[in-house]
Image: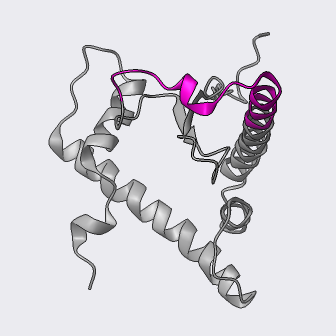
Amino acid sequence: MVDEQERLLPIANVGRIMKLILPPSAKISKEAKQTIQECASEFISFVTGEASDKCHKENRKTVNGDDICWALSSLGFDDYAEAIVRYLHKYREHESERANYKQETSKARDVTGQHDHEDKVEGDDDEEEEGLCHTDSQRGKGITSTRHRHPAPLKFRIIDRNDTSPS
């Protein structure tokens, strides 16, 4: 059987997420973190299991975002499903824009004659910096990988449907 701690979300991540919503002076007990850790992990397993069952019935091996949205809806979590569908749509738009950006910058480099190794930041050979990605846009040409800045991360607001005040 899978070790209990392996099926749970990391407690440090759970605590960090809990702190995001609380006032800075608030304290969270270890017991509260563990309770939320268990509940969130169980919820994720429940939804993922439903999505996995759907994929198995359809003879597919990979669970995707649409399967998770379907599972949330079929389990009665329609509000979550709607939010995840919106997030998934925005995420896919972002990924498409990022791919287009990479393609455009690669083409611009080819036109200007600039090589990938000229973009490399000094003093940071193996370390990943937040917001940077590595690509091998000119693979096979003896040129090192390129480092591009990702577009700004997606940010979402939670909208209270019961709030009647104008925004």
Color style of the picture: one colour
Residue 125 on the magenta span: no
Q: In which quarter of the image is the C terminus?
A: top right
Q: In this view, does 34 lie to the left or right of 105?
A: left
Residue 99 or 115: which is nearer the viewer?
115
Q: Residue at horizontal 66%, vertical 25%?
A: 151
Q: Find the residue positioned furthest to the top.
A: 166
Image coordinates for residue 139, horizontal then vertical, percent: 63, 51
Q: Residue at horizontal 33%, vertical 22%?
A: 123
Q: In this view, does 36 lie to the left or right of 133?
A: left
Q: Residue at horizontal 79%, vertical 44%?
A: 89
- 109 shown above or below 61: above
- 134 shown above or below 53: above
Residue 123 on the magenta span: yes
Q: Quadrant of the N terminus?
A: bottom left
- 61 shown above or below 158: below
Quadrant assignment, res 158: top right
**Magenta segment boundaries in residue numbering:** 102-124
Image coordinates for residue 137, horizontal then vertical, percent: 67, 44
How many labels, in total? Answer: 0
